[in-house]
Amino acid sequence: IISSLKTVKMKGSFAKKDRYCLVITDYSSKKSFYRKIGFSSKKKTSKLEDIIKRSSKTTWNDQLPISGRHMLKLIRQLGMTTDHFPELRMYFAGRRRISYDVFRRIILPRVNGHSNETKVGVDVTSFLNKISKSDIIAARTVSIEEVQKPGDFYDMEVPLYRNFIANSFLLHNSQARYARIREGLLNDFMKKVGDTASAQFKGLKELVGIIIGGPGPIKEEFYNGEFLTYDIKKKVLGVIDTSYSGIPGLNETVERSDELLKEASVTRERKLLERFFGEFAKDSGLAIYGLHEVIEALKAGNVDILLISEEFDWVRASFECPKCDFKKEEVLRSEDTKGHTCDKCNSDLNVTGENDITEEIVKMAEETGATVEYISTDTAKGEQLKEIGGIAGILRFKAA
């Protein structure tokens, strides 16, 4: 990312300090900033997208840092003229620039193929070949200001990296190297996150879905890449954009996931009920409903998926006669506990207790390894399950 640090004088009676701005004018640098760094604010991200769309596509990242007029002087030292490069006359006239790609495809092969064994010729050829392998970037000079300050002038070279500082400008060949290092570290980080997530989620039968959240564009790069295993990635419900990272970002992800979770739940319920009613319609013997039938199948360890309506209202009710010592216990719907009479004296029985049996049934299912699914009545098929008793099962095998 090619950028400049700009100092802006703040106006107003309360402005005691200057404001520092990071200025990015290069097209590809803007895109890199958007893709690899970005803003946490949606408003700023939207504004940046608009700026990129309206920006000139000209980029300085791949421009050869040698002007056409200077290049002309170099090739003349080799005994060559612009006639050797007829397609680049505008470049040699100083009226346009060329990219590294053009330099490597057109100028360099012809220079290397031109015989010039003089010391000057060998030096120029060697220099141009080194330039082709460098990462030097042609920076764009927006303005030049003369600063009247007395002082000494220093040049400093770093021998190992061939970087040097001239008149306070650091000139080096490390921009692309840093970009490659950063990209490698980012890729390693996302791979580590993907491996950890895949290992943690693998084998979780209760795992309904995964939501990826966070600020900036990296979450999309993580999701679109091959960092999660296929079986885990297909459980991703969606990607949530947040304004924060860390714990606040996690809380924000949860808050913004309501719609995704509801949609995922409805989709999962629909698929389960379609499977159940499909087995029932073709009379495969793998679909059962009704409390007694389901309990018998659970006792036999034959239930693969237990479907329970959210409005399942069966209870274990206790009755007692107020006139004699008669007592009894029955499993029935909550709405059916009224109007029971004594088997001995025919008096009206009192209801002495009602216990929801859902917990008992779920415990039986868990002990036999059955998956328990709670079904809402928000859909037509969910309402249909309620009407047939509120409980059903998909069997592992057809009962004899």
Image (cartoon, helix red, strand yellow):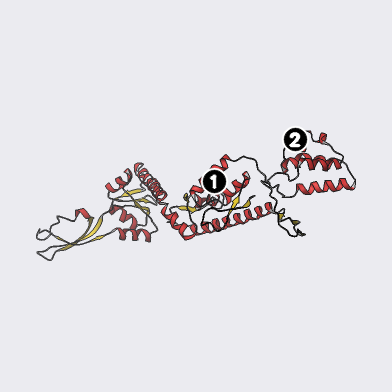
Q: Depth check: 393 or 73 in front? A: 73
- Identify the residue at horizontal 53%, vertical 59% (top origin): 196
Q: How many marks?
A: 2
Mark number, residue 48: 1
> What is the quadrant of residue 333 in the picture?
bottom left
- In terms of depth relative to the viewer, which is nearer, 245 or 327? 245
Instruction: Depth check: give the residue in front, 398 or 372.
Output: 372
Q: Residue at x 65, y 43 (%)?
A: 59
* Vertical side of 96 occupied by 29: above or below: below
The residue sitting at 72% across, 38% down in the picture is 96
Residue 201 in the image, given as x and y percentages of width and height: 48, 57
Disc 2 designates what residue?
90
Q: Looking at this view, name the residue that lies furthest to the right.
A: 118
Residue 90 visible in the displayed image: yes
Q: Secondary structure at mark 2?
A: helix
Amino acid carrying mark 1 in the image: Leu
Mark 1 → mark 2, Cα distance in angstroms? 34 Å
Dot 1, crowdedness within 10 Å: few (<14), some or many (≥20)?
some
SS of the residue at dot 1? Answer: helix
Identify the residue at image location x=57%, y=39%. Answer: 54
Label whose residue precedes the other's in the sequence (1 or 2): 1
List x then y, in percent, for residue 366.
Answer: 37, 60
- Residue 108 visible: no
Q: Compared to 67, does 201 lie above or below?
A: below
The x, y position of residue 266, in whole percent, is 38, 47
Expressed as whole percent of the image width and height from the top left, the position of residue 176 reads 68, 51
